Image: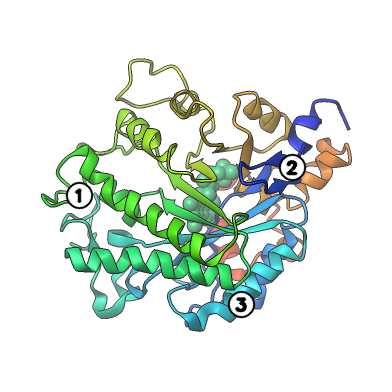
Amino acid sequence: MSKNNNALLSTYTFANGVELKNRIVMAPMTNFSSNDDGTITEAEAAYYARRSSGASMVITACTYVTPNGKGFPGEFGADSDDMIPSLSKLAKAIKDQGAKAVLQIFHGGRMCPPDLVPGKEVVSASDVPAEGEGNPVPKSLSESEIEEIIDAFGETTRRAITAGFDGVEIHGANGYLIQQFFSPHSNRREDRFGGSLEKRMAFPLAVVDKVKSVAAEHADSSFLIGYRFSPEEPETPGITMDETLALIDVLSDKGLDYLHVSLMEFASTPRRGVDDLNKTRIDHLQETIDNRVPLIGVGSIYTAEDARHALESGVPLLALGRELIIDPDWVQKVAEGKEDEIITELDKDKQEQLVVPDPLWNIITTTPGWFPGV
Ligand SMILES: Cc1cc2nc3c(=O)[nH]c(=O)nc-3n(C[C@H](O)[C@H](O)[C@H](O)COP(=O)(O)O)c2cc1C
């Protein structure tokens, strides 16, 4: 093992005392492979088990907290107590291999395909469709419906605790419901959930408060709570970097265990909203966070060199997504001094060895430009 790899392989201790065995986390990735009733499949459990002996923490694909939050075909559910045995199977598949298991909790809002939600009724903060052709006009949620969804994030957290997960990650990124409330594009409300930057934070913060109170009631202090966010939106109006820094400033004092940025490129720079557009988004975020809470960085980290370089930015933890599909033995190869054997392009002949379920495999091998090698 070369000396520098100590940085990647050293332990990390969260403020609540939970220790991770190294700095590599598996990024949440939807796999389209659950049963139609929302339970997980054997293929899915095997896919996670194959990737849970190297990374210190595995964040699952997103799971819907209410039936009208289902955002993908083959997404697994956490919207009723009937799902607890399925969730337990998933938590066990991950934890048996040595990683911490974190459930990513989610509502798709206006991004849900109408066919996947009850009565084909897609909902959001306001009745503004996503940009692009043919997107459905969502129904604007009433205040009582909003409260029900906040409660559902709490109920899903309770189920995650019962099922044996080590934590939950609130999915506030990638344009889904929580982000839709923060975004001036999708949130045109004039009540307590919208109208000003502060009011657009009300729903995300209410979800955080609910999840925290349920965890305080049902779990011990080792239960991790993370929050994922996307720093910017391309649309006008849309979330700008300075608005995200304002949200992150508030979230940094919320007693969360970690924040997790969603980026496709680790070293990407802001589009707009801050004076210094040459400084990376990660550097802007780190400056605002000012060591109050750990930030997980992510985005196109493929080689050990990429990862070492990313850690030099000062983030304590790195999430790898596509690369852990391409090479599930990434961490082990680094640990054994075999980093030159890390595979960084998807080998389309190796589905079986890589243990990837058919629906996910079919999508990633037929979508050009998404995965290296395809
Ligand atoms: C197949 C696939 C599914 C994804 N599903 C999710 C998801 O469910 N939740 C989420 O927050 N991000 C999701 N993402 C984004 C990843 O977590 C990650 O941020 C992104 O892929 C960039 O990291 P990478 O370059 O290491 O892949 C997904 C990405 C991929 C490739």
Indicate if the residue with disc 3 has its beta carbon within 8 Å of ligand 1: no
Q: How far is disc 1 from disc 3 in space, using C-alphas?
A: 36 Å
Of residues 249 and 365, the one drawn nearer to the viewer in this rendering: 249
First along the sequence among labels 1 and 2:
2
Quarter-wise, where is residue 312 in the image? top right
Quarter-wise, where is residue 273 in the image? top left
Is 280 drawn above or below residue 180 in the view shown?
A: above
Query: Is the residue marked by circle 2 packed among few (<14), some (14-19), or many (20+) residues within 10 Å?
Result: many
Q: Residue at x 75, y 44 (%)?
A: 343
Q: How far is disc 1 from disc 2 in space, using C-alphas?
A: 39 Å
**Residue 14, x across and y down, in percent:** 63, 42
Q: Which residue is mark 2?
A: 22
Q: Residue at x 49, y 65 (%)?
A: 217
Could you tell me if residue 284 is visible in this image? Answer: yes
Q: Amino acid at mark 2?
A: Asn
202 on left or right of 165 = left
Q: Which residue is mark 3?
A: 41
Quadrant of the rendering where the N terminus is positioned? top right
Q: Amino acid at mark 1?
A: Asn
